[in-house]
Amino acid sequence: MYTRYMFIKATYVLFIAVTLFLTGCAKNVNSIEADEVTLSQRIENSAISTATVPPTNMPHTPQPTFTPISNTPTPSIVPDTPTPTVMSATVTAKPTATATLSHEQIDANLTELMLTNDGCELPCWWGILPGEALMSSAREKLTALGASWIGDLTSTIGIDWGMGIEFEVDDEIVQTIDIYSSYFPGIERDKYTQGWQPHSLTAVLEHYGLPTRVLVYKPFEADPGQPSYHLLVFYEDLGIEIDYIGSVEILGDNRYLACPDIADIWKVHMLLYQPSQVDDVVERILPTSSISYIADPETVHEVISWQQATGTSLESFFETYSTSEGNCFEFSTP
């Protein structure tokens, strides 16, 4: 059984992989030396195996089977007597073209934006503020930075590492921004870790202060690989929610050990929104029906609260992790 993150957004990994592969195809293969293989080419060889065999010491979320899209479709020759063309039901829309940028430029844009956030504070993301930004402006901006699009509301950006960005729109106004990024074989780990460093647990606590809510739980065990945990940090008054996902050590008797250093986090999922425009964000992020196996739906959020799961206060959580990422913690999940 999966949460909204582990079920609805599990397809982002393959989505990012396919998009980065298509982006990489635009580079002249005759000019690439054997030791200069890009991420998009490495993903071509690893995307299918990633869907069934997770990386070492990381949990595996089942991925949907997909049919690759041919990059060079064979043109149809129309005879004197037109013959109807049968379209495959499995073909999906290709991403729209990105701006004409080199791989180096796209990665440089991503690195700069992750470092500066284009000068704005969360829930603003790269200068796009939920509740105010026009979707057309957001699309134009991301495209100019080198993002690819599938449909009108979902984009990916990055070559050596990257992320998916999904928008919820009402009357052309951006309502929420859903950001998803996952480390998997083919991604440059150092760039992934450095990219998310400004949004690490310690950086977020130091900048935004005491959270309004923290949830922690062990949702599943991957086989093979280690079990994982979710650490969800909420700033409901600001419109920020961040889910850090990493491997957990089993201590026994429903006790677990987690170390939320950004170098050990293999997935980050962030929801940004205007507080006045989104109600019951906890239930929206983590519906009790999706984790009812942990406890009674009426009490499940209390059971997986930081206080209940660890026996310590939010103030203690803040004091521990606002100054250092190197600390581990024990928690329990029924």
Image (cartoon, helix red, strand yellow):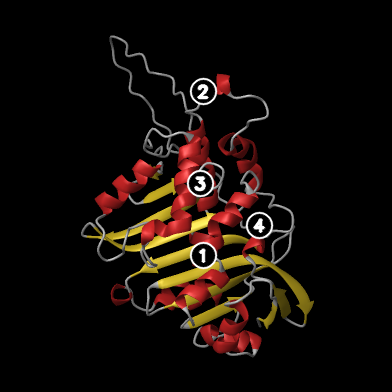
Depth order, front residue of 259/110 = 110
Distance (Cα) linking label 1 and label 3: 20 Å
- The image quarter in which residue 96 lies: top left
Q: Closer to us: mark 1 or mark 4? A: 1
* Nearer mark to the viewer, of 1 and 2: 1
Residue in view at x 77 percent, y 83 percent:
253
> Closer to the N terminus: mark 1 or mark 4?
4
| Residue that mark 3 sits on | 16
How far apart are the two marked residues, 2 and 3, measured between alpha carbons? 21 Å
Snapshot quadrant of residue 254 = bottom right
- The residue under label 4 is 60
Residue 28 shows which numbered tag?
Answer: 2
Amino acid bearing label 1: His
Amino acid type for the residue under numbered disc 3: Ile
Of circles 1 and 3, which is in front? 1
Q: Is residue 18 visible?
A: yes
Q: Given this view, does label 3 or label 4 mark the residue nearer the observer?
A: 3
Which of 42 and 32 lies nearest the eye of the viewer? Answer: 32
Task: Tell me the residue at 49%/46% (across/down).
Answer: 15
Quadrant holding the C terminus:
bottom right
Q: Do the residues labelled 2 and 4 touch (CB within 8 Å)?
A: no
Residue position marked by numbered label 1 in the rendering: 199
Q: Camera-side residue: 70 or 275?
A: 275
Secondary structure of the residue carrying numbered label 2: loop
Question: Could you tell which of marks 2 and 4 lies nearer the N-terminus?
Answer: 2
Report crowding for label 4: few under 14, some 14 to 19, many 20 or more residues within 10 A (C-alpha).
Answer: many
Q: As drawn, which residue projects farthest toward the right?
A: 252
- The three-letter amino acid code for the residue at tag 4 is His
Looking at the rendered image, the disc whose residue lies closer to the viewer, 2 or 3, is 2
Residue type at numbered disc 2: Asn
